[in-house]
Amino acid sequence: MTPIVLAEKDTIAKAMSIMRTKDIGRIPIIDAKGRLSGILSFRDIVEKYLLKPVSRKGGSVARGKNV
């Protein structure tokens, strides 16, 4: 089985497509030399592109406000 990874240059759209088709919530990101450079999670995408920033100490994700 080939591991599922993304290159640093890959798009968010590609990441979301893989997450959806493979039913996974995280994907390792590798650099040009094949070394791990990070992990992208579905939550990362949601927080960065779909929601207003929310404090991780507390807050309502549904409303995007601190409570």
Image (cartoon, helix red, strand yellow):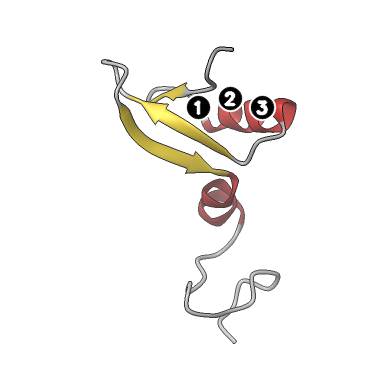
**Quarter of the N terminus within the rendering:** top right
- Residue occupying the point 26% across, 15% down: 33
Say which mark, if any, is on residue 17. 3
- Residue occupying the point 48% across, 72% down: 56
Name the kind of residue labelled 2 in the image.
Lys
**Mark 1 neighbour class, 10 Å CA radius: few under 14, some 14 to 19, many 20 or more:** few
Name the kind of residue labelled 3 in the image.
Ser
Q: How far, Cα to Cα, is label 3 from label 1?
A: 10 Å
Residue lying furthest left in this view? 33
**Mark 3 neighbour class, 10 Å CA radius: few under 14, some 14 to 19, many 20 or more:** few
Q: Are marks 2 and 3 in contact (CB under 8 Å)?
A: yes
Across and down, in percent, residue 54 comes to 52, 70
**Above or below — where is 67 with respect to 57?**
below
Position of 2 with respect to 60 (left or right) is left
Across and down, in percent, residue 19 comes to 65, 32
Q: How far, Cα to Cα, is label 2 from label 3?
A: 5 Å
**Quarter of the C terminus within the rendering:** bottom right
Across and down, in percent, residue 9 comes to 39, 22
Say which mark, if any, is on residue 14. 2
**Above or below — where is 43 with respect to 23?**
below
Please tell me how many numbered marks the rendered image carries. Answer: 3
Q: Which residue is mark 1?
A: 11
Which badge, 3 or 1, is on the more N-terminal residue?
A: 1
- Residue occupying the point 72% across, 33% down: 23
Q: How far, Cα to Cα, is label 1 from label 2?
A: 5 Å
SS for dot 2: helix
**Nearer-the-camera pick, 21 or 51:** 21
Across and down, in percent, residue 10 comes to 46, 23
